Amino acid sequence: MKKRIMCLVIVLTIMASSISAYGDTGMNGVQDALKGLGKLMVSFVSYAAERFKDVKESDWFAEYVGKLNSLMIIDGMPDGTFNPKGTVTRAQFVKMLVQAMGYKKVDSISFDDIKPLEHGRAHWASVYVETALRNGVISLDELGGKFFPEAPITRKDMFMMMYKALQLQPSAGENPFFDTESNGVFTKLFEEYLARGVLDGEKRLFRPGSHSTRAEAAVVIARMLEYKADPSGFVAKMEKQERISMPLDMYERLMSDPKNLDGRTMEQANEDLYEYTEKSVYLKYYNYTPEQLVEHVVKLARDYIAADWNIDYRTVEKTYPNKVKDIIPAAHYRQDVPRIIKYYIDNKVIQETTFYTNTDLVYGDQGLFYVRGTVIFRYLPPTSQNALSRLKERDNGKLLALGQWYSEDIELRVAGTAEPNNPNLKLTVGRVNILNQPLSVER
């Protein structure tokens, strides 16, 4: 309890100092506070983990949940949980949005299904729904005079409400989404990095009819506030996150880890890499520019993790040798692959993994390249306990559990190897170093 109170005190202290610095105690002050607080994620993540029993510091939504809860925009369940995977109703989302926007409340009722029945009370969210109506966030005739407050909110409705609250204007650009109407609304949301959808092959999908979880709704509201406070700053931040192809907090953690850098920062080590690469014998061998060579090194690392960390014991004997043949040293291939395959089959290993890295996370030293990254992985039944026993969780020392996703920072060593009958060097992945123990995460 003391720890939880201390986290809240830290958050509120930072908020108060941010607001007073701008001389504004109204909604603009809160937005300015958020603008400054976006750079001080430190308190929100730990606060969310202390406040809710089912939120961990490693959860992708923890920062947003902590931020909105400290601003009293969202709350948890009576049992002390946040229920991040729970669905969100239309009434619940409207309440969050109205609270976040700081609208002056309007105590009236316009929708038929919000009005009280005979001798009854109005719907609990009547004030929030009416306030949203009066501020142009929703429309009375949109659904025939009814609001359907207890229906799960769809992604389309959630983002339309945000679009209207931010008073955005339609874009004349091309609609990036395969499954939304071309009315300029979703194009604008895409251009402002407020909605990005998911890629399915060559198609970008928005999935407008899908329902959102409480965690997803919290992220939408937090990003809406951040955008309102500083649109250009928000877009610049999201552009960077998209460029680095990984969550920003993950990227910053890997960039700030001092391990193996000989007193340099990762940024300095990466800058030194290109000077080092210009003298590399691999440029001539591959006929690459330094930038192309670094991209090749990153591709080798990704291909290795795709092959060696995504395993199905039922097919590994047929698929594994071909996948690793060109990305590990030939001597390792001859000596180790049969043993590795036997281990996977004997322990019935099924492992799924996603690997996050980019060219910023590469450095070189004495003829070697090192690629940092984060793996998000899990083991599935019937993987044996023997296979799980090699690693323990970082936060509690427990053995890994089947079905649970884990995050682990790693560093791959990429080096040149030569065959006895071939004097040419070829870059291969020789070793994987673990930078920290696994941490359980939600996905």
Image (tube, helix red, strand yellow):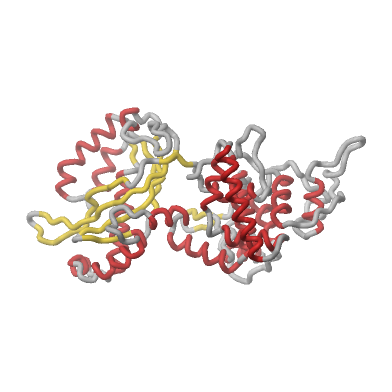
Query: What residue do we see at 62% from left, 35% from top?
Result: 80
Q: Residue furthest left?
A: 421
- In-front residue for pair 407/303: 407
Residue 403: x and y, percent? Answer: 44, 34
Residue 426: quadrant of the picture: bottom left
Residue 287: quadrant of the picture: bottom left
Which quadrant: the N terminus?
top right
Residue 88: x and y, percent? Answer: 66, 43
Q: Is residue 209 visible?
A: no
- In-front residue for pair 65/306: 65
Query: What residue do we see at 55% from left, 40% from top?
Result: 3
Residue 391: x and y, percent? Answer: 34, 36
Q: Does residue 175 sit above or below 414 in this rendering? A: below
- In-front residue for pair 58/26: 26
**In this rendering, position of residue 59 left or right of residue 130:** left
Q: Is residue 121 visible?
A: yes
Residue 252: quadrant of the picture: bottom left
Q: Does residue 124 sit above or below 256 in this rendering? A: above
**In this rendering, position of residue 303 left or right of residue 29:** left
Residue 263: x and y, percent? Answer: 30, 59
Q: Residue furthest right?
A: 119
Q: How many marks?
A: 0
Query: What residue do we see at 13% from left, 56% from top?
Result: 418
Query: What residue do we see at 35% from left, 59% from top?
Result: 361
**In this rendering, position of residue 12 left or right of residue 304:** right
